[in-house]
Image: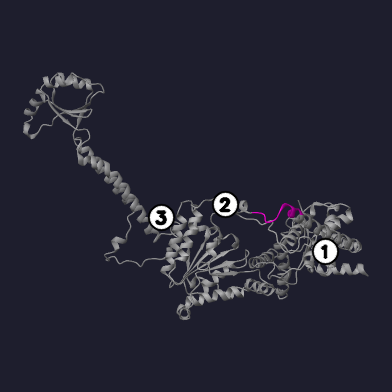
Amino acid sequence: MAMADNEDKGKKLPPEEPGSPLSGQSQQQSPLSWLQYLVLLFLIILTFQYCSNGQFGVEREVLSYSDFKAALGEGKVASVLFKGQRITGVFKPSANDSAADKEAGKDKTENQQEKRFATTLPPLEDPQLLPLLERQQVKIQAESPQGGLLQRMAILLLPWILIIVLLVWLARRMQARMGAVTPGSPFSFARSPAKRFERSQSEITFDDVAGLANAKRDLQEIAGYLKDPEHYRKLGAKIPRGILLMGPPGTGKTLMAKALAGESDAPFFSISGSEFIEMFVGVGASRVRDMFAEAKKEAPAIIFIDEIDSVGRARGTGLGGGHDEREQTLNQILGEMDGFDPQEAVVVIAATNRPDVLDAALLRPGRFDRKITLDLPDKPARREILRIHSKNVPLHGEVDLEHLAALTAGFAGADLENLINEAALLAGRLNKSVVDMGCLLQARDKVVLGGEREVIMGEDGRKTVAYHEAGHALTAVLLPHADPLEKATIIPRGHSLGATEQIPTENHHNMKVSYLRDRIGVMLGGRVAEQLVFKEVSSGAESDLKQATRLAQHMVTHWGMSQKLGPVAFRRGEEHIFLGKEMAQQKDFSEHTSEIIDDEVIALISGIEQEIEELLKNNVKKLDALAHALLEKETLNGVEIHQVIAQCSQ
């Protein structure tokens, strides 16, 4: 009751001998050498194209079109070559050049260098050009601007060949660097990201799991089958296809799977359900196929899928259609589990805390044959869990794990581990060499109520909180079926301005009407005390009223504890995560019955409130004494509260 305040990456190859014939093959070309080869090949292509145009190693005088026609009119041009809009040609040797060559003793056959020129045709057609060439008796040649067939094919195909070669080289180089395709590589998005473990890699065994005797027995049977399958086959036994671990968060579902990996000699593949889903359609189904294929290769093997509800939700519900990526992944899982060869010892273990949303096809025999429920640990199991998690923590000799287990009713295994860690952190903050009982109790309060916080309140505010918590504490002491009182405090913690704690002597699996009524009475005790003393109530009872209303609704609609409605259960207040189910849900009772349910809930809470009001009126002195003691000490344990009440009774 609280008063609310508004992989293989490390493997190395053996060194190669210098004379080994494979030594040269194993060496990777550096990126620089490959870049040089690509540049050289590109230059060769350019050279080939340049040579094919007849422009390699020849000096040409670039003329304007007007100068070309002038030289043509003067009879200086010997020959021309038309290639598209470009004209190249050779000048006639002049008389001065011939005389100079003769004086130098050069023979024409030794090849005087011909003078060449080049020009470009204008975009406008010149009808005078061809007659002028004919009059000057110029040799005319023409070539296609597209070049030959070989040249055109080279220009068209070589860039694509270069791109393909580059991509193949990059892919091979990346795979060579990683040794294999890993989940993080860009070529592995369709590969399974499941982590593979051997027995030597897992240090957790069933000895490290406290409580959960039924779950350990079932999983030890699976481990025994995987170790010696022939023994079970001789008896005609078949290994279960799948095991579904169900339970609240923190009860040890993943820990049980790790313990099975440590106990079994079989390879263990671990993956989370959310790792199947990616933005690419079909990736999830591909990863499922790859994971099951790897497990079948190494059978007998174990596949562990954590949080399977992320991909195993019921199909055909909500806003997604039948082609939703999640549903395709689920369909592939169903097909793989149902398609096992009976001789293949592959077991699928899945964990979830929402078995109610799983698809019915997953839960049928032949898929998940065995369903194991992991409940919150009882007192002996909590004591054993505390012992396991405190093995490496130096505890003070006066630490009583039995008492601490009694104070942690409703804690899951993860909560108990967190409690030990918080106590060790607190001891370190206080510069203690060991963890004492005080640190453990403070850590428990921090886990349950939150850390202490400073809230500036006036005297009236502190008095209101004190009477509120005193009302809770007094009703918890006076009501015969209420849980034993542990402590009451007005120190603000978490979102509360104060708190009153009760510790049940045992786990309540089957609650009686008398116990439930007294439990609601303790929740209403703070509000009734405020009304009794200050003649008005505050907003501090918000959390109490929510819990009381929810419990009363369950009594009326689920447990048949209403005389007016009788032994009938009504589906009311059930939440579905799928919009489709919620919209399709039909009420199984009429509006008139709904009104009766509301009236019965209100009547139940109002009747209990009147009883608590009468109880506190008859014990006002005890209420005042408890409130004053809380204002003075701020925190009272169960023994101190009983002492204050006993003094008022004298």
Packing grade of label 2 (10 A; few <14, some 14-19, many >=20) is some
Name the amino acid type tagged 2.
Gly
Q: 425 or 273: nearer the eye?
A: 273
Number of the front mark, 3 or 2: 2
88 vs 47: above or below: above
Image position of 254 (left or right of 159): right
Packing grade of label 1 (10 A; few <14, some 14-19, many >=20) is many
Q: Secondary structure at mark 2?
A: loop
Q: Which residues are magenta?
A: 586-595
Q: Position of residue 400 (x, y in %)?
A: 72, 74
- Report the residue marked by disc 3: 187
Contact (Cβ within 8 Å) of mark 3 with mark 2: no
378 falls in the magenta region: no
The quadrant in which residue 259 appears is bottom right
Contact (Cβ within 8 Å) of mark 1 with mark 2: no
At a point 79% along the width and 65% down the height, the residue shown is 487
- Report the residue marked by disc 1: 473
136 vs 223: above or below: above
593 falls in the magenta region: yes
Whole-angstrom CA distance, mark 3 to mark 1, is: 64 Å
Image position of 5 (left or right of 265): right
Name the amino acid type tagged 1.
Ala
Name the amino acid type tagged 3.
Phe
Number of the front mark, 1 or 2: 2
At a point 55% along the width and 60% down the height, the residue shown is 359
Q: 215 or 69: nearer the eye?
A: 215
